[in-house]
Amino acid sequence: MSHPASDRTVLITGGGRGIGFELAKLCAADGATVVLVDVSEATLNGAVEELRKRGARAEGFVHDVTDRDGCYALRRRVEDAVGDVDVLVNNAGIVHKGDFLAGEDSAWAHTVDVNLNGVMWMMHAFMPSMVKRGRGHVVNVASILGLAPAGGAAVYCATKHAVIALTEAVRFELLERGYPGVHLTAACPGFTDTGMFRGVRTPPMFRAVAPRDTAKAIYRGMRRRSRVIRYPYRFYFLPQFYALCPHPLWRAATRLLGVHRAMDSHTANRLTASDE
């Protein structure tokens, strides 16, 4: 099986740090040209510089994925700089804590803009060239909370659930219309120690894992062109359990484990898109 990153161009949003940057290092080590996109210029410049010191071919573009027209402009800038994008990784994301009814409208709107709309605009901007060439790969970073939601992050869960559905539906559309060479993957990691969920208290089975470990799992899924990636592996059957478990039993289990109030201790109320 050919490696999807070798000698190809991989664009990663939220690529300045966290999972995005760790994934960029893995792609670069296998010979990819890496394009990092981030809202923070300082973070972005540091990440690009580090990749270049490692001998990687790397470019960086400051961009806010919520800027719909800007996503199309970004595509033109990227194509002028490095050519067509072979692999698009929609990693940018944010989380606002708090119960849904207690939250501000602006916080929930912002969450939807980054986590869902930003994914749509980037896909709509970069996928047509993949379809035209008959090959490409889109990896949308969702969350295990998109498969088994928890309280205290209702809108975050909703956006990640929507990203999974978007990924699945677009895959079906491409297959039905005769474009099997364009692959889509929904990555559903658990809590990752990037700072995005700083302060969240979880039971041992839900403990946060290192960003590099999550990035490795996503990269393995990219190599296999997996439909869905679930990591850590102890979460593999969590969605099935959630789907089949009677609601009173599920609620009792989450209360027993403390999951239903885990976000109460969240200390990073808003993190930028590069923190996921």
Image: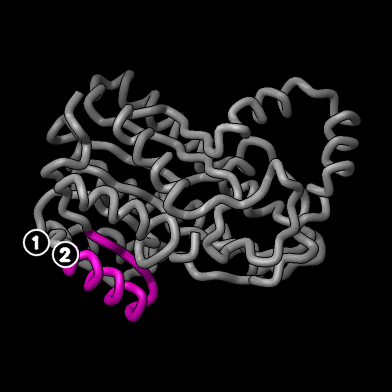
> In the picture provided, is 223 more to the left or to the right than 140?
left
In magenta segment, residue 75: no
Q: Quadrant of the N terminus?
A: top left
**Would you identify the image quadrant in which residue 182 lies?**
top left
Residue sitting nearer the eye, 136 or 28: 28
Could you tell me residue 244's position as x and y percent?
A: 75, 20
Residue positioned 74% across, 52% down in the render: 202
**Would you identify the image quadrant in which residue 106 lies?**
bottom right
Q: Which mark is residue 61?
A: none
Residue positioned 56% across, 32% down in the render: 233
Q: What residue type is labelled 2?
A: Arg
Could you tell me residue 55's position as x and y percent?
A: 13, 62
Q: Which mark is residue 77?
A: 2
Magenta residues?
35-54
In contact (CB < 8 Å): disc 1 and disc 2: yes
**Would you identify the image quadrant in which residue 108 lies?**
bottom right
Residue positioned 64% across, 43% down in the render: 145
Q: Name the residue under label 1.
A: 80
Q: Is the magenta stretch mostly helix, strand or loop?
A: helix
Q: Which amino acid does label 1 sit on?
A: Asp
Could you tell me residue 224's position as x and y percent?
A: 32, 27
Mark 2: give few (<14), some (14-19) or many (20+) Cα within 10 Å.
Answer: few
> How many dots with numbers?
2
Q: In this view, does 201 lie above or below 165?
A: below
Disc 2 secondary structure class: helix
Residue sitting nearer the eye, 195 or 82: 195
In magenta segment, residue 42: yes
